[in-house]
């Protein structure tokens, strides 16, 4: 889609961040507060919130509802951020909604993300979805999505990311995530680190809100590649289309949310529908496997230390120590990304590492920055590449059969585009 409105939107600065709710609140008021017409599930978390959102949306869809899903960022096309029952918003609808928001956005100096958030609320209210699953962009308390009064909130976890805006301790970051908790609106918690728990307990108590915690109020256990869920209900032998052990936490949060919605008399859970839905969940770039020229390529968006740690832990549990050629590229927009720490974590599973530059609207870790950072840590073989294309070509000629592509979503998006061309060549 190419249009004047879309061009205007991108000119706002794809990653200009101005935390605060005043601007978006004023604009939404003038648009008739479309967010108030929606039954919303609001999701925050350092990692896993996109996967959790996708699982919740599919569970609701398979139970017969019309479900809006708003996530960010996108891999290939802006339309991916706005889905109804798994379908991206059509070009002409997106163009019309951006045009509708544009005059107000200009008047109140909205950011890119604030505009897309307003578009999402308009789209879902105008199409009269039954539920809208809304993913926070960053943090929670001052995130543009935090103008909603949801039916359920979910906080998947708390880790270090966007520390320039959210703080440099787990307690500070937890405080920002806790900002989505609303008075008497149930909140579901995934795998929360002990340091962050007092922050959430305090907020729940303050707002007289019930919290449901993984491994305390509900449990998920893996058994021979299948999942068993134990909450108010029990679901056994669940097959989730999203791979990776860490997805069990996201699955647990989604199923607990479904139970809460049933308790609110908003749906009636059918166990066979749950099983069917979990096989249908799609979330691109998460533990995705591709085979090209006898090489097994695993692609996973692990864009911060906790994401990398979860991925490495999963692969080590499968006996994959020192068995991968790792292709890694990462952004460092706020200058505080601990990319060396991520590299060192990945070295546990890598036989060889290709570090890459790539095209992005955001500031990336350059090859010169990589060389400076890892000069004292090169026990393994490291090769530097100016683009994913060159790295992938070289990787396909290496004797190592397993390739792991990981890093920022913008890096993974570029890799997918390159892989499409390689597949055509084969």
Image (cartoon, helix red, strand yellow):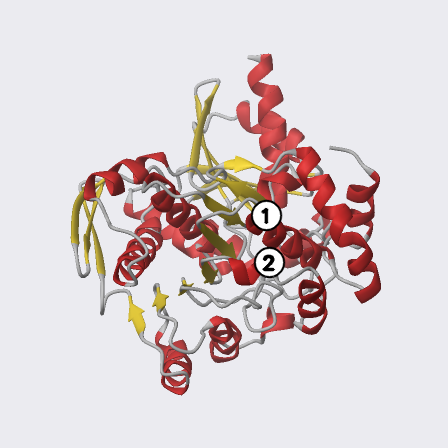
Q: Which residue is mark 2?
A: 34
265 above or below 298? below
Q: Secondary structure at mark 1?
A: helix
Estimate the spatial distance between the alpha carbons at disc 2 and disc 1, rounded to whole Å.
Answer: 8 Å
Seen at 43% across and 19% down, the residue is 294
Pointers 2 and 1 in contact (CB under 8 A)?
Answer: yes
Task: Tell me the tag on residue 408.
Answer: none
List x then y, in percent, for residue 278.
Answer: 31, 40
Residue at left 47%, top 79%?
171
Dot 2, crowdedness within 10 Å: few (<14), some or many (≥20)? Answer: many
Q: Position of residue 92 (x, y in %)?
A: 70, 34
Q: Residues within 10 Å of mark 1 (few under 14, many from 20)?
A: few
For image coordinates 45% across by 29% down, the residue present is: 400
**Residue 258 in sight in this render:** yes
Q: Nearer the viewer, residue 393 or 381?
A: 393
Judging by the rendered image, the residue that carries numbered circle 1 is: 126
Query: Mark 2 or mark 1: which comes first in sequence?
Result: 2
User: Going by the picture, which residue comes out furthest to the top?
Assistant: 426
Judge whether residue 359 can be spotted in this image.
Answer: no
x 42%, y 40%: residue: 287
Q: Picture coordinates of residue 297 (x, y %)?
A: 46, 31
Observer-nearest of 372 and 12 = 12
Mark 2 lies on a secondary structure that is helix
Is 201 placed above or below 152 here? below
Position of the N terminus by quadrant: top right
Q: Nearer the viewer, residue 173 or 403?
A: 173
Eyeballing the image, is 388 above or below 410? above
- Horizontally, residue 334 falls left or right of residue 150, namely right
Closer to the camera in the image, 331 or 328: 331
């Amino acid at each position: 889609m190419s249009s004047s409105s879309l061009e205007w939107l991108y000119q706002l600065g794809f990653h200009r961040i101005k935390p605060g709710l005043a601007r978006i609140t004023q604009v939404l008021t003038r648009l008739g507060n479309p967010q108030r017409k929606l039954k919303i599930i609001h999701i925050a978390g350092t990692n896993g919130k996109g996967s959790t959102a996708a699982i919740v949306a599919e569970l609701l869809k398979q139970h017969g509802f019309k479900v809006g899903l708003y996530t960010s960022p996108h891999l290939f096309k802006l339309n991916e951020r706005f889905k109804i029952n798994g379908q991206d918003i059509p070009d002409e609808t997106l163009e019309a909604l951006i045009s509708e928001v544009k005059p107000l956005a200009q008047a109140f100096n909205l950011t890119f993300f604030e505009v897309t958030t307003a578009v999402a609320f308009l789209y879902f209210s105008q199409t009269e979805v039954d539920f809208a699953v809304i993913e926070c962009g960053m943090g929670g308390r001052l995130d543009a999505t935090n103008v909603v009064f949801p039916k359920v909130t979910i906080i998947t976890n708390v880790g270090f990311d966007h520390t320039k805006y959210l703080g440099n301790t787990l307690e500070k970051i937890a405080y920002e995530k806790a900002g989505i908790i609303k008075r008497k609106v149930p909140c579901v918690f995934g795998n929360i680190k002990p340091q962050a728990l007092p922050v959430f307990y305090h907020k729940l108590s303050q707002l007289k809100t019930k919290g449901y915690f993984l491994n305390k109020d509900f449990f998920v256990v893996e058994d021979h590649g299948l999942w068993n869920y134990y909450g108010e209900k029990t679901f056994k032998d669940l097959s989730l289309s999203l791979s990776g052990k860490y997805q069990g936490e996201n699955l647990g949060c989604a199923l607990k949310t479904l139970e809460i919605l049933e308790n609110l008399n908003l749906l009636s859970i059918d166990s066979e529908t749950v099983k069917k839905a979990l096989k249908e969940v799609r979330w691109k770039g998460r533990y995705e496997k591709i085979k090209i020229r006898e090489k097994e390529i695993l692609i996973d968006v692990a864009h911060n230390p906790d994401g990398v740690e979860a991925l490495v832990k999963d692969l080590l549990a499968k006996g994959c120590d020192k068995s991968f050629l790792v292709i890694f590229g990462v952004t460092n927009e706020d200058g505080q990304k601990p990319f060396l720490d991520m590299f060192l974590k990945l070295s546990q599973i890598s036989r060889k590492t290709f570090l890459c530059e790539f095209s992005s609207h955001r500031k990336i870790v350059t090859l010169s920055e990589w060389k400076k950072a890892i000069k004292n840590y090169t026990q393994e073989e490291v090769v530097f590449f100016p683009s994913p294309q060159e790295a992938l070509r070289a990787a396909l000629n290496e004797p190592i059969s397993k390739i792991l592509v990981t890093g920022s979503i913008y890096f993974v998006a570029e890799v997918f585009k390159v892989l499409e061309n390689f597949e055509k060549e084969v």
